[in-house]
Image (cartoon, helix red, strand yellow):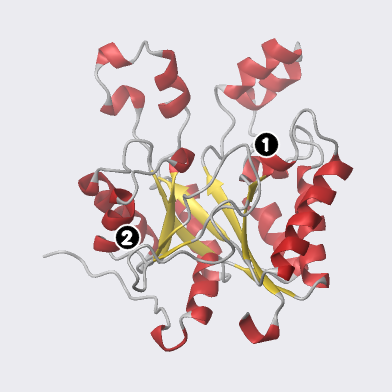
């Protein structure tokens, strides 16, 4: 393992909805709590947790990967007959624009501070090279240099087609292989190399909602996470965690922030290397070190 570390933990965040929109009336009805509507009529941004995560990870002495989504708009990109499908509201309503000035600013702030910015491929993109290329290019234009890897939205994969597209587009890794409701090393203990070349796959070890769900208390979730890390240590493994930014809002998602801190600190206590996917790949690839190449404008 890297520099005599016992195992590795890669920290990742999927940026799906940094603004609380349709969730407000839903939670107000389900929980009979009208305070859930407050963010719709104020400047409050309960799901905008970037500064909090950066400060928290800075205190922990770690960096992570943020995957940014460039999703379609229901009313702009879909036909009117698609507007009435309930599934499409969940998929496409309330998304953000990658060119939103606030999003652009935070992407560049993350990058300047040493965090990795990667691509969160949109829902319909796993087998669409044209869409993925445009999403990658637009994110790179915002960022100012090429990106290293990505993860597909909802962990949607067409294997091996999606990975072939990723490799063709110049990505060096994908982090989509995994489960939203199960934890563990279901795909082995190390990186996968599906094409026996430099392209790598980071299997997902645990998502926050799979560790700490409605029927799980914080202590049980913590012990399950510790068990995973002890297993990782015994097997010289790479563990990949996914924490969506909104779960750092303790007012609505009690326990998730503390669980994240506890897991990172426990990994550090057990001599784990902790960081972003791209940084881990840079280190393990040695002489094939990844470089952040400037984006060249197309003629």
Circle 1 — which element? Answer: loop
Q: Quadrant of the N terminus?
A: bottom right
Residue 46, disc: 1
* Frontmost residue, 286 versus 62: 286
Give the residue pinned by disc 2. 141
Quarter of the view holding residue 19: top right
Residue appearing at x 36%, y 69% in the figure? 145
Tell me: 87 left or right of 249.
left
Measured Cα–Cα span from mark 2 to mark 1: 28 Å
Residue appearing at x 69%, y 23% in the figure? 38
Instruction: Where is residue 129? Give x, y as percent.
Output: 23, 49
Circle 2 — which element? Answer: helix
Res 186 visible: yes
- Crowd around label 1: few <14 · some 14–19 · many ≥20 (10 Å): some
Against 115, is 208 above or below?
above
Residue found at the far left of this picture: 299
Residue appearing at x 49%, y 69% in the figure? 278
């Amino acid at each position: 393992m890297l520099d005599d570390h016992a195992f590795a933990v890669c920290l990742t965040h999927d940026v799906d909805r940094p603004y609380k929109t349709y969730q407000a009336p839903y939670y107000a009805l389900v929980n009979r709590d009208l305070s859930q509507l407050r963010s719709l009529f104020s400047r409050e941004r309960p799901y905008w947790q970037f500064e909090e995560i950066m400060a928290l990870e800075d205190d922990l002495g770690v960096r992570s990967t943020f995957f940014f989504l460039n999703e379609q708009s229901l009313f702009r990109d879909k036909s009117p007959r698609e507007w009435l499908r309930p599934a499409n509201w969940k998929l496409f309503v309330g998304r953000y624009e990658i060119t939103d000035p606030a999003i652009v600013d935070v992407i560049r702030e993350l990058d300047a501070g040493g965090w990795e910015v990667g691509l969160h491929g949109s829902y319909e993109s796993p087998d669409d090279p044209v869409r993925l290329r445009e999403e990658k290019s637009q994110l790179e234009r915002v960022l100012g240099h090429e990106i290293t890897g990505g993860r597909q939205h909802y962990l949607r994969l067409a294997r091996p087609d999606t990975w072939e597209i990723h490799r063709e587009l110049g990505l060096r890794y994908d982090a989509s292989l995994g489960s939203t409701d199960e934890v563990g090393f279901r795909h082995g203990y190390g990186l996968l190399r599906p094409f026996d070349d430099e392209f790598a796959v980071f299997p997902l070890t645990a998502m926050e909602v799979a560790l700490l769900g409605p029927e799980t208390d914080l202590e049980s979730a913590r012990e399950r996470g510790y068990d995973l890390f002890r297993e990782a240590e015994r097997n010289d493994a790479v563990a990949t965690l996914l924490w969506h930014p909104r779960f750092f809002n303790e007012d609505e998602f009690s326990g998730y922030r503390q669980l994240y801190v506890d897991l990172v600190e426990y990994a550090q206590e057990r001599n784990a290397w902790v960081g972003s996917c791209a940084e881990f790949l840079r280190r393990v690839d040695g002489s094939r070190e990844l470089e952040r190449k400037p984006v060249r404008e197309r003629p």
